[in-house]
Image (spheres, helix red, strand yellow):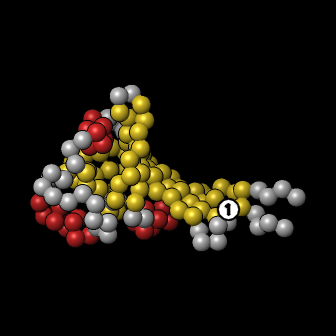
Amino acid sequence: MTNRTWLIDLPQEVCAKLIESATIGRLGVIVAGKPEVFPVAHVYLDGDIIFPTNTGTKVHAALEWPWIGFEVDGLESDGESGWSVMVSGRAEEITDPNTIKHLVATRSAPWRRGNDVRWIRIVPTEITGRRIEADPPN
């Protein structure tokens, strides 16, 4: 007998909890006409994904292109199932010092510190998620 894999759509509330629980996500942007993916340590706050970065390829690509992607995923401890959440949206820079102070205190991964940090907010236009489950082996 062949094992099958099932894809189960996740409701928005579950997607939000999974984004919030993930420490690291992946930012997908277009650089010089090609897709590139960068790991980012994010915060999920009021429905937005927010991460710090320096002035470089990632921030320029995110702010210059009208659409970006963001993804988090995980594997369950049983190894029989996993999940993935994909976000499409637009990026904008956060410059308010009080907001930034709150974000710094909220983060669990201390990547990107210092005076050259720029904070980017992803404002989602679409969030979709799936759980992937395999039939148990016979």
Check disc 1: other Cα within 10 Å, few if <14, some if 14-19, many if 20+: some
Q: Secondary structure at mark 1?
A: strand
Query: Is any atom of residue 46 visible in this view?
Result: no
| Occupied quadrant, residue 57 | top left
Image position, residue 25 (x, y; %): 41, 56
- Residue found 67% across the figure and 62% down from its top: 133
Front residue of 34/44: it is 34
Pinpoint residue 35: horizontal percent, then vertical percent: 43, 35
Q: Is residue 125 left or right of residue 55?
A: right
Tag count: 1
Residue 85 pos. (x, y %): 50, 56
**In what quadrant of the picture does the N terminus appear?**
bottom right
**Residue 19 vertical placement versus 36 (above, below):** below
| Closer to the camera in the image, 69 or 23 | 23
Q: Which residue is mark 1?
A: 133
Residue 103 image position (x, y, % from top left): 23, 64
Q: Residue at x 58, y 57 (%)?
A: 130
**Direction top: furthest residue:** 33
The amino acid pointed to by label 1 is Glu
Residue 95 in sight here: yes
76 to the left or right of 39: right
Q: Is residue 29 left or right of residue 81?
A: left
Extreme-right residue of the structure: 1
Quadrant of the image for the C terminus? bottom right
